[in-house]
Image (cartoon, rainbow, N blue to C red):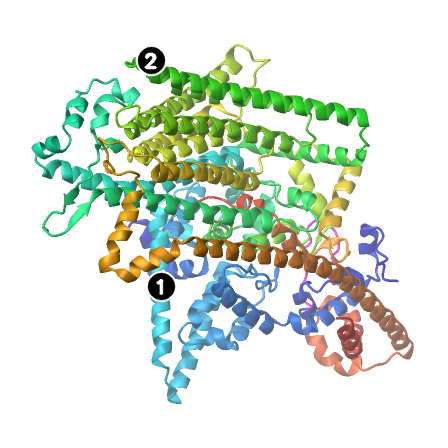
Amino acid sequence: MGSSHSVFSEQELNDYQDLTYFTKKEILHVFKRYKDLYEDSADENTKKTSSLNKDKILKLPELKVNPFSDRIVKVFSSSGDGNMTFEDFLDMMSVFSDGAPKNVKVEYAFRIYDFDEDDMISDQDLKEVVDRLTGEQKLSKDEMQQLIDNILEEADLDDDDSLSFAEFEHVISKAPDFINSFRIRL
Amino acid sequence: MSRDPRGDPSSRRRDEAVEMSQINPGYLDDSIGRDPNHQVINMDGRIPWARYGSARDAAELISELPSRQLDRLVSDTGKSIRARRKSQKTALHGSLRGFPHTHRPTNDLTNSMARNEELMDELDGDIRTNEVLRGMSSHHLTDKRQIKHDVSEKRKERTLSRKKHHEKLGTWKTMKYRVGMTWIHFKNNLKEFGYSLELWKSLMKKVEGHFGTGVTSYFLFLKWIFLLNIPVFILTFGFVVLPQILFRYNQPVTTVDNNNSTNVTSYHVSFSGEELLTGGGWFNDTELYYGYYTNLQVAVPLSNSIKYDMKYAYLFTCGGYYILCLFILAFSISKSYKKNYVEGSSTTSFYNVTRVLCGWDYNITAKQASDLKHKSFYNEMKEYLAGKGKKKKEKELSDSCKWFFIRVLTNLIVLGMIGGAGYLIYYILDKNLSESDVHIIGELTMPLVISSIHLVFPFIFARIGSLENYEKPKHELYIGMFRTMLLKGALLGILVSYWFRRLPGSVYCWETKVGNELYRLVLIDFIFILGATFFLEFIHKVMANYCCTEKLKEPEFDIGRNTLDLIYSQALCWFGTFYSPLLSVMMIVKLFILFYVKVVSCLQNCRPSSKAWRASRTHTIFLGFLFFFFLLTTVAVAVSIITIRPSEECGPFRGEDKAYDVVTNLVDSWSGDYKVLHEIVKVISSPGVIAGVLVILCVGTYYMRIVMVGHKEMVTLLRHQLTMEGKDKAYLLRKLQKVRSKKKEKLVQLGQGPGRILSGTAGLREPPEQGGKRIFTRKLVLNCICFYGKFSSKWKWYT
């Protein structure tokens, strides 16, 4: 088979195929994208095993403009510092792929938006999300408070001023746009 | 009493005595409770509650609850996966939410998986394990691979030990497994194949990166229609066109002459080039049109006895592709409706949440698009908040009267415009018919006028719509789209009714004539779309950039208008396929070219829209329009087949009274040889059975509706109950906390407790820096467990 095929053993490819939502061809495509993020021309095997610096991962066009990019790389990085190995990268692309079911996507979205990682999306987290979404312009304090109140009123079923995973999932399952927007095409 | 003393969130977090209510819901990370070494990664300087002793105890308590046990989670996931396999309908809730944020040793999970019978099954345990692992977000891929291998090792061991005990597997199970494996491999291969076949992948990605999902939805729709036309083409080509070509080359020319001398004399025109535009002349004598097809039986090569009857083939293929389209459309429309309306609807609307939590389009790659996304989000939120803050002011009666009259007036104007356009078309058609020898320009007048109307009127409608002062821009958009659709439908209806009423009998081979007209319509429509793309997008952009920089901005890609154009083209194609079987080829070519033209124009000329486009909802509406047009055209074709007399001189149904007679004759001919079949058809087509089926359908629909209403009420009830449960739980936890703090005081006073006994072992697991506190913590844990009994009994009572 092709030259890039030889980088992975058949066993590895099978494992990847079993554990992600990709086919083998797509996995090789993901590897190509990952490889391209290395700016130096190191040999493919090193690229496969070593982990790529966070700054370089953030050069991926989709992440470059994404306001949550630092959260994304953090959630998917196995070392927890944003640096990613190929397997982490594959994991990420798999979750963002078309094949990944909604519940898996919801799970990761929850973790991405859970900035303080206490397994709850609190009002602080929501504030952060809104702040990052508005970009350079910022909502005034009152507006922000009103917006957060609206959100909690809609989604916070048990009145504890933050969204648990179940509440988050419940809301997202009612939003048909989610699955289309929470996606990165290969 | 049930109200939580929450107050200011920031102050409460710093409060040493953290309220239990804060960690109230059961979805907490239980790893924190189980693993005292755990340190939550601190993002923005806030102190996570888990560091406080009391809160940690509560977390520990919660982690003791049966629903939080890992084994349970694993087996639940296994079950839900099976349930999902059985019915795709149920969404999979409760995926394995294990221990996010922590990098726990994979052993725990491996062990708990190894305890699960399902996952350790020697045959399909492997597949199940993969599925469980794949849906887990708690571990990274590297760990997952490790777990997968460990579990499979364990499985092997088990299998070996089982073999020692001479337990044999049933053949049935082995076979099931084999079939399952082959199926999975087949599916993987198919996916691989599909991936390499996927059309226009990189272009789609590019568009999506620059414009987001809204504009991409247009291109996806285009692609979908393109793909829809391919099976139609294969059907018509395989069953109608190919036999006819065979017939043409197998049959000696003389036979054709004998059968239909008028045909040959009148149609033998040489190719002049003009036909490409008009679709007439030389083309009339080809497989492009109905009139060319024979009513004879076609000899099948290599066989003398079997004959291929052209008229059956023509009629049944036609029926076949309409039914095929009906199924495809019905399925996709129901899927889309379910996804976007049924699942999306709820007792409360989630406007704010979905806007914020689905606010970012992860596909975007272009800087410009992302800036615009930020801006549009900001504006949208700002507008919404401002609108909500104002509170709807009561409208004055005179005001609403005014708007009512204005809307009546505008609607009348719109209807008048549509009526006028309809009359114009009728006039042109009538004039063309009366002239015996029509010039090429004359032939093209009708399609040119129709396409111009389709081009100009939507803009006028949009203008009128903006005068009507709708509260939401969404309504304005939908009403504009509806009017455009009404216009397109009305014009098409006038054409069809005119053709059906006036053409049969008055012209030679009227089906071919209709085919000619449709050919022209499709072609001119295509040219107009290209022209509109060029002028409205390219020239607009050039002007915006070079001459009128202030007045004009770069054009936005008009998703609504473009999609409606596509739907109209497809409607023409559906209607025309009966009269001109190769029209689907034209459509395929047209869409193929259109895709590239539109992509290039969109990427080069347009700028991302500043308004958000709700792709999912509009998609259903577009499908609805498409379905409506499909029904319209199908009914039209069916009417022509059943009621109108086909031409005497040409086509597969020459000599019949109605085209449908072919079927009735066929059924009658069965009465001798296949009596049963004849009876069955007779019974099925009898009015009684049809009425019965209709009644059953109605009852079914009514039943479904009742069930749906019931479900909705249930949801409201459950929601209410959930809120109450949450409050109860908070209340109980707070009580518990109070009791414990009292105990704590007592313990401090006494200076001794059961904790001391345990402190030796506990100390080994505690981090050194917590030294002083640790004994204390253990005491609390014990107390906690003591109270757990009381708590759980109370809890049961509440649930």
Quadrant of the frame with the N terminus of chain B: bottom right
**Distance of mark 2 from mark 1, alpha carbons?**
59 Å
**The residue marked by circle 1 belongs to what chain?**
B
The amino acid marked with disc number 1 is: Trp
Q: How many marks?
A: 2
Give the vertical position of B56 relative to A83 (above or below): below
**B238 with respect to B322 (left or right):** left
Which mark identifies residue B441?
2
Q: Which residue lies furthest to the top in this view?
A: B547
Circle 2: element type: helix
Seen from the viewer's position, the closer of residues B511 and A61 is: B511
**B230 with respect to B558 (left or right):** left
Residue, disc 1: B183
Magenta residues span B36-50
Residue B737 visible somewhere in the drawing: yes
Residue B126 point in image, percent of width and height: 43, 70
State the image quarter where residue B36 is shown.
Answer: bottom right
Give the vertical position of B35 relative to B560 (above or below): below
The amino acid marked with disc number 2 is: Ile
